[in-house]
Structures are given as structure tokens and as C-alpha cells.
Image (cartoon, rainbow, N blue to C red):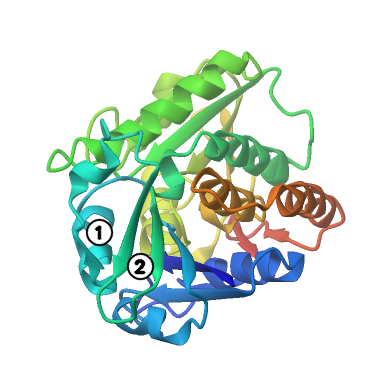
Amino acid sequence: MQALVIVAHGSHLNPDSSAPTHRHADTIRATGAFDEVKTGFWKEEPSLREVLRTVESDEVYVVPLFVSEGYFTEQVIPRELRLSGWDVSEWDSDGLSADTATLSAKDTGQTVHYCGPVGTHEAMTDVLVRRAETVTGDPDVGEDFGLAVVGHGTERNENSAKAIEYHAERVREMGRFDEVQALYMDEEPEVDDVTDYFESEDVVVVPLFIADGFHTQEDIPEDVGLTDDYRTGYDVPSEVDGHRIWYAGAVGTEGLMADVILERAADAGAEIEAAIDTVREETRDAEATGDVALDRETGTAGD
């Protein structure tokens, strides 16, 4: 038997924080690719410390639903899962290239394929583009548009910005959008000045965050100038300094994220190619028919 465990941060304060994780787990569970699909959280139940005890399978693929390599993926998750012999050098990563480390769980004896975070996988680039398609309602969006990829950024962890720069460059290389810019909340260049970085009249702003929360629903809309008070709502698109801003909300709410999770597990050795094809097709169909709707008042995705 083989199992997939998706691990995420969660929140005691925001009940919607874990919703995307559960939704992606449901999408993958429906493919039948794994005998079991479980979720575990740092700030919610089931906890990271207990989640492996809920799994019957002897072989487990653990995929962190995090944006970048850092404290949680390198220290917290391996410690809470009690992965025997874990050392970050197992990933041999430059901050972007963590793939898989195969270890055993100390107290359950399971073989654990511990994968790199979803945020640094190359398939995430496709999710960013899909997010732009969803928010504009245009499957061919790109010409005459700019795209801003927004991250938190912090000078305390250089890896925080690496994923943002990586995907911005990959989208830029596609040649699909007229302009592509990486922007940050806590370091330069800042998202507050988004209109200074684009000549295009239309700009899609996609936060590279896993779930919608305070940053994506309150801070960024106010920083960008969509509204003076997030509680009053805003239109998508909104006019800001002569530009139309198409604010997408957290990329992690996009249905195609389930594909990135599967890609991580496949890279670790799971034989799930058919499931990957199914998820890519079904998430596109679902979004095209409005099963995943975008709230035009708040710029966030809902069920």
C-alpha cells in the first residue's frame, strides 16, 4: 500500500486557511492513485506529530504545501514526523532544488519519501499562469498584459525570494505576457509600488501564497491601492493609477495545485502518471465551467 500525506501550516485564527489543502486532497483522492490520502497541519488537527499514525500504508509520500525551503520544511516538519537520520543535506539543494529524501519514521517504521515544497517545483509556473487565466476569464491572457508575481519576502531567509524570482523568470521566458515582475511585501521591489513597474494598462497580480489569509485578503489589496479598507471590498479589475489591476488572490487556491502535489510524489517514485493527466484535465474543465468561482468583490477564490 502507498499513501500520500499533504502537510501544511494551517491556522488557529483563520478557519479558511486549510480549505485549499483539503480541496486538493479530495481532488487527488478521487483519482484513486493512492490507497490513502491524508492531511496534516502545524496549527490545526490532525497535527504533523500524529498524522503518520493515521496512515496504514507502509510506504508514504509526504509533500509539504509550502512556498519555499526554510525553517518549516527543513526543521519543523522532519522533526514532527520524527524522520530518522534527517539532515537538510539529504536534499542537496541550493534553495530551489530540493526533491526527495527517503527515510524511515522512528515510531511507526514506515518508509517516508520526504519531498521538496510545492512552491519550488517547476509545475508551479503553470499554476501561476492558470491563475491569471482564471481571474481574467481569458484562457489566452497574456498579450497587452503584465503579470506581477508577489511573495512575502524577508531578508532573514534568502530562499523566500528565490521561488518568486524563479517562477517570474520562467513566465518571462514563455514570452506570453508583455511584462513580468517579481514583487514583495517586506523587501524591495515592493508590491505597494506595483504600477511603477508596468507600462501595460492591464496587470494581473498573483500572490505566491498557499492559502488566502490576512496577507492576501487584507494587506496586499490595501498595499496595491485596490481599497483603503479591505472590509469594504473592491472590484476585479480595479483602476489604480491609470492601470487595471486584476487581483487574483493566493495561487494555492487554484485547482491545478493538485497537479503540483502529484508531480512532487511522482518525482519521488510514485507511479501516478494517469492521475496527473486526470487532474490536469479535470481542473481545467472545472474552472472553465465555473466550479471554482472567483469572488469579484474580494478577489478570492471560493467553492
Q: Position of residue 76 (x, y in %)?
A: 21, 65
Q: Residue at x 40, y 49 (%)?
A: 117
Q: Residue at x 46, y 56 (%)?
A: 210
Front-lying residue, 300 or 23: 23
Residue 105 falls left or right of residue 40: left
Instruction: Find disc 1 in the rendering and name its residue.
Output: 72
Residue 171 falls left or right of residue 194: right
Identified by mark 2, the residue type is His
Query: Given contact means CB atoms under 8 Å apart, are the residues at marks 2 and 1 in contact?
Result: yes
Q: Say which element carries label 1.
A: helix
Residue at the left extreme, as displayed:
156
The mark closer to the camera, 2 or 1, is 1
* Distance from the alpha carbon under mark 2 to that under mark 1: 9 Å
The quadrant of the image that shows the C terminus is bottom right
Identified by mark 1, the residue type is Phe
Residue 93 falls left or right of residue 193: left
Q: Residue at x 36, y 41 (%)?
A: 151
Front-lying residue, 25 or 190: 25
Q: Position of residue 164 (x, y in %)?
A: 39, 34
Q: Residue at x 58, y 53 (%)?
A: 270
The quadrant of the image that shows the N terminus is bottom right
Q: Position of residue 290 (x, y in %)?
A: 82, 58
Task: Characterize the local packing of mark 1: few (<14), some (14-19) or many (20 or more) Cα atoms within 10 angstroms.
Answer: some
Q: Position of residue 64 (x, y in %)?
A: 40, 58
Query: In this orientation, does residue 249 appear?
Result: no
Residue 184 falls left or right of residue 237: left
The quadrant in which residue 12 appears is bottom left
Q: Say which element carries label 2.
A: loop
Q: Which mark is residue 9?
A: 2
Where 77 falls versus 116 (above or below)?
A: below
